[in-house]
Image: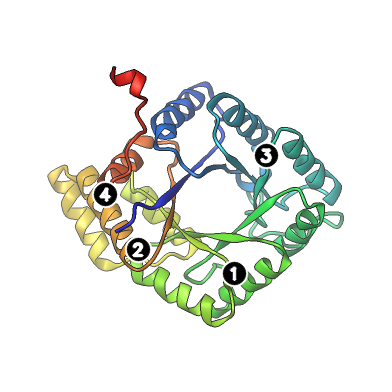
Amino acid sequence: MQTPRISFEFFPPQTLDASFRLWDTVQTLAPLKPGFVSVTYGAGGTTRKLTHEAVTTLGANFGLNVAAHLTCVDASREETLAIAETYAEAGVTEIVALRGDAPKGAARFTARPDGFASSIELIEALAATGRFKLSVGAYPEAHPEADNPAANVAWLKRKIDAGASSAITQFFFEAETFFRFRDACEKAGIDAPIIPGILPITSWSGARRFAERCGTTVPQWLDEAFTAAHRDGREELLATALATELCDDLLEGGVEDLHFYTLNRPHLTRDICFALGIVPEVSLQNVA
């Protein structure tokens, strides 16, 4: 089985302690030589400035290929494209283009009259600049605002046709979920790479809440496994084993790329990568 290409998602720090955690995360995972790392926006675009600072710092100081998240939330078209321009000037060539979550307190996304109405419009505008390689989000299960899973496939097709060259999925807990989605995408004529998003479970209660918010199915066996592991103090061991098994199943099914949602907590992601045979590159000078 071939060693997969990997990438990591980080989020920008909003406190001093969070800054230290991000830099620890980067220093722990950068030696694994990811193909790229992405930096998120907060809900409602609340970390826009922090995201820009993190993107430029990671690229300049760590030599990482950084993909910046960019959303449609709470900004005009002009403001959004100006942000993209600052990324281009900083040497960023990859953007993860997303509609974005609704601002805090809002029930659902509502476009500004002078803003992009959807991720499709954002992708089209960014593609027209000719300056970026664009990735988009994909939902292997029904998006909370979608009528059914088929609507997710149709929407992804529109995003690829608008100018995106790859997609990264929301996390899921069973490999068959991804394979069903991949098959449906192929049937719909989507030939762009679809990268599975992997969530190492650092907290089962947190992961479960996140799953409920984004429409990810939680298998009963997984609930039972973490209940037993919590009782025995083996949650981290279980999380590592389950994520490694999920990745193994995906790789056996032909997947070549894995994208890890690190939550800026690197050690579980690192251990999973080690288990998959991905190890830090060592300079000969360091072992002399």
Camera-side mark, 3 or 4: 3
Q: Residue at x 46, y 73 (%)?
A: 181
What amino acid type should be assigned to the residue bearing mark 1? Answer: Glu
Query: Camera-side residue: 91 or 202?
Result: 91
Left or right: 92 as drawn, with respect to 219: right
Camera-side mark, 1 or 3: 3
Q: CA distance from mark 3 to mark 2?
A: 30 Å
Q: Is residue 97 visible?
A: no
Q: Residue at x 86, y 47 (%)?
A: 78
Residue 286 vertical position relative to residue 116 in the rendered view, above or below: above
What amino acid type should be assigned to the residue bearing mark 2? Answer: Leu
Residue position for label 1: 145
The image quadrant that residue 227 belongs to is: bottom left
Camera-side mark, 1 or 2: 2
Q: Do the residues bearing badges 3 and 4 touch, measured as CB atoms within 8 Å? A: no
Image mark for residue 92: 3
Q: CA distance from mark 2 to mark 4?
A: 17 Å
- Say which label, 1 or 2, has the lower sequence index: 1
What amino acid type should be assigned to the residue bearing mark 4? Answer: Ala
Quick one: quadrant of the C terminus? top left
Q: Residue at x 39, y 30 (%)?
A: 28
- Say which label, 1 or 4, has the lower sequence index: 1
Q: Do the residues bearing badges 1 and 2 touch, measured as CB atoms within 8 Å? A: no
What is the crowding at mark 2: few (fewer than 14 residues within 10 Å), some, or many (at least 20)?
many
Image mark for residue 250: 2
Q: CA distance from mark 1 to mark 3?
A: 31 Å
What amino acid type should be assigned to the residue bearing mark 3? Answer: Val
- Say which label, 3 or 4, has the lower sequence index: 3
At mark 4, the secondary structure is helix
Residue position for label 4: 239
- Say which label, 3 or 2, has the lower sequence index: 3
